[in-house]
Amino acid sequence: MNQQELKAKLKALPTNPGCYLMKDIDNKIIYVGKAKNLSNRVKQYFTGAHDHKTTKLVSNINDFDYVLTNTEKEALLLEINLIKQHTPRYNIMFMDDKSYPYIKLTKEDYPMLKMVREKKRDKSSLYFGPYPDVLAARQTIQLLNQIYPLRKCLRLPKKACLYYYLHECLGPCEFDIKKDVYESLRNQVIRILKGDTKELIDDLLTKMNKASDELNFEKAQEYHELVTSIQHITAKQQVQTNRNIDQDVWNVYADKGYICIQLLAIRNGMMIRKKSVLNQLYEEEDEALVAYLGQYYQQNEIVKEIIVLNTLDTDSLDDTISDHIIKPYRGHRLSLIKMAYDNAQEYLNRKFSVINTIDEQSNMAQSDLNKLLNKQIKRIEVFDNSHISGSNAVAGMVVFVDGKPVKKEYRKYQLHQANNDVGSMKEVIYRRYFRLLKDKLVLPDLILVDGGHQQILATHEILSSLYLPITVLGMVKDNKHNTAGLMRLDGSLCEIKKDSALFFMITRIQDEVHRFAITYHQQKRLKAQTHSLLDDVVGIGKVRKKKLLTHFGSYQALKQASVMDISAVVPSDVAELVYQMIHISDENKL
C-alpha cells in the first residue's frame, strides 16, 4: 500500500470501539489489537516517534483491517479469538496450553487417589491443587499410597493383588472392610493434602526412634525417608496467609521494550506456583495484562480472588472474570501485588541480560561474517553427511537466520551414493536446490558444508550447473576433530580469531549440523539392524517389537539377553524364536 492510500484509509477510520489487524507485505496478519477508539489508536502507529520494538513492528506493516464492536468488552473477547486464530508474531499469546494437575480423592466406599488435569464439579470426589507440575502431583500420590492403604485398582479383582501383600491396600476385593476404616483413612489423607502433617510426622518420628532403639536400623531408615519426603512435598512456601482461600496475584514490569507478566498462584493460603511470561511489548503494559488475563482464564480455573493493581482498568474483561477481581489499596493483598512486581522486575532483568548477551554476540558474529565475505549474510544453510562404511548413508541440513537456528526448516535426506562422500554431497545439494528453484523458495546467502576441499568443489559444481551464484565455504576441523575455521573455494583458509564471536558461531553451527545428521543416521541404523531380525520372526508385530526395543534399549542389549530375559517381554515360544534368529544371524556373519 502506498502512502497516499494509507493516508486515505487512516482518515476514514471510525471512532467506534473494535479490533484492528496489522498485515505485512504478504497480507499475513502480524498483530491484533483492540481500541476504545479505532481512529485514535491506529493512527498512533503511523505518527510520532516509537521505541525500537514498536518501530520494528511498524516497519513490517503494509496494510491494516479492522472489525467494529459495540463495546470495548466485546473488542477484548474478539481480540482473544483473533489471536488464537491467526497467532500473530508480534502479539503476546498464552502459549501454555496445558492445564495444571490436581489430585482427586474419590468418595467411594473404597476411595482411591488419582491425578487429573481438570477440576470438575463432581460431588463424588474431592480435588486438591493445582500442583506446580505433574511430577509433584505424582510424588504426592505415590507417597500417600505408600503410607495409607487406599484402594489401587480401578476395577476390584476377585482376589487380593500384590498391593495387599505389600501392605499398601486392605484388600477390599477379598476381605470385608468396615466403612469407618476407610472413612478414617480418607480423613487422614485430606488433612495431609491440606498441609496438616504435624500429627503424621510426629507418629513416624516416634516409630523411627522405636525402631532405632530396637536396633532395626533398616526400618528406622524407611521412617526417616518417609518424613523427609513428606516435608519436601508438603513444605510450606514463602507466601502464607491466614485465609485458606485460592488467590491469583498479577502484576507486570516493562523495560527496554519488553514486558514480564507475573502470576503468583496461592492455594489454601500457600503460594504453590510462580509463572513468568516474557515478551516484546507493542502496546501499553496494562492493556497487555488485561488481554493476557482474558486468554488465561479461558483455559484455567477462575479462582475466588484475582488480585490486580488498583489502577488497572479491567472493565473490558468478561463478567465471569470481573466478579472475582480485587484491587487492594492496603494490607496483605497489596504486599502480594508488590511481591509480584518485584518478581516480574527480577525475571525481566535477569532474562534480558541473557537475551542482550546472545543478541550482542550474534550481531557481532554476523557483522564479522559480512566483513569477511564482503557481502550481507542473513540466511545460512549447512550440510553434513553421515554413514559407516557406506551403510545407511544420510545427510542433514540445518538453517540459521541472523545467527539463530530455525529448526522448523531443518531437513533430512536418505542418500543413494553410499560409498562416495563427494557423490553424496553432490546428491544432497542437487536435491535441495533443484527443489528450491522448482518451488520458488527462498535461497540462502551462504552454504556451509562440513568437509574438506573436495566437498566444497562438489557443492560449487552442482550450484554452477543450476546457475546459482551462492557463496560456498567448508567448515574444517583440526586433527583433534575440533573446529579449525572456514575454507574457501580455492582451498585457502579464512583467518578467524579463536576468541571471536564469529568463531564461536561457526563452532555452534558445526556442532548442530553434526548432531542433527548423526542422530538421523543412528535412527536409520537401528531400524536397519532390527528390521531383518525382529520383523522376520513369527509372532513379532509392531507392538511386541516396540516392547522389546523399549525394554532392552538397544539391539546390542537384546543380543546379550537370554531366552528367559526375552520371555519377560514376549511369550516364551516367541522369545525362543527371537533368540535363535539373532544368534543364527551372527553365525552367518562369521
Image (cartoon, grey):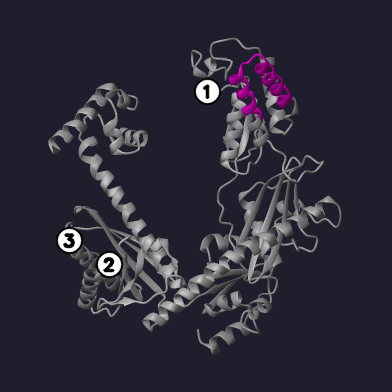
| Quarter of the rendering containing residue 6 | bottom right
Q: Residue at x 24, y 35 (%)?
A: 534
Q: Earlier in the sequence, mark 2 or mark 1?
A: 1
Please state the extent of the stretch shown in magenta in the rendering: 200-227
In this picture, residue 231 sits left or right of residue 412: right
Q: Residue at x 54, y 86 (%)?
A: 5
| Quarter of the rendering containing residue 422 | bottom left
Furthest residue toward right: 330
Residue 556 against residue 426 in the figure, above or below: above
Is 222 magenta? The answer is yes
In this picture, residue 297 sits left or right of residue 493: right
- In the picture of the structure, the residue carrying the numbered disc 2 is 432
The dot on residue 153 is 1
Q: Nearer the viewer, residue 407 or 539?
A: 407
Is label 3 in a helix, a strand or a loop? loop
- In the picture of the structure, the residue carrying the numbered disc 3 is 420
Mark 2–mark 1 CB contact (< 8 Å): no
Q: What type is the residue that disc 1 sits on?
A: Cys
Instruction: Kindly report which numbered mark, 3 or 2, lies closer to the viewer in this rendering.
Output: 3
The answer to whether residue 26 shows anywhere in this view is: no
Q: What type is the residue that disc 2 sits on?
A: Arg
Instruction: Answer few, some or many: residues within 10 Å of disc 3's Cα (few below 14, many 20 plus, some between 14 and 19).
Output: few
Is 163 magenta? The answer is no
Q: Position of residue 245 (x, y in %)?
A: 76, 42
Furthest residue toward front: 479
Q: Position of residue 433 (x, y in %)?
A: 27, 70
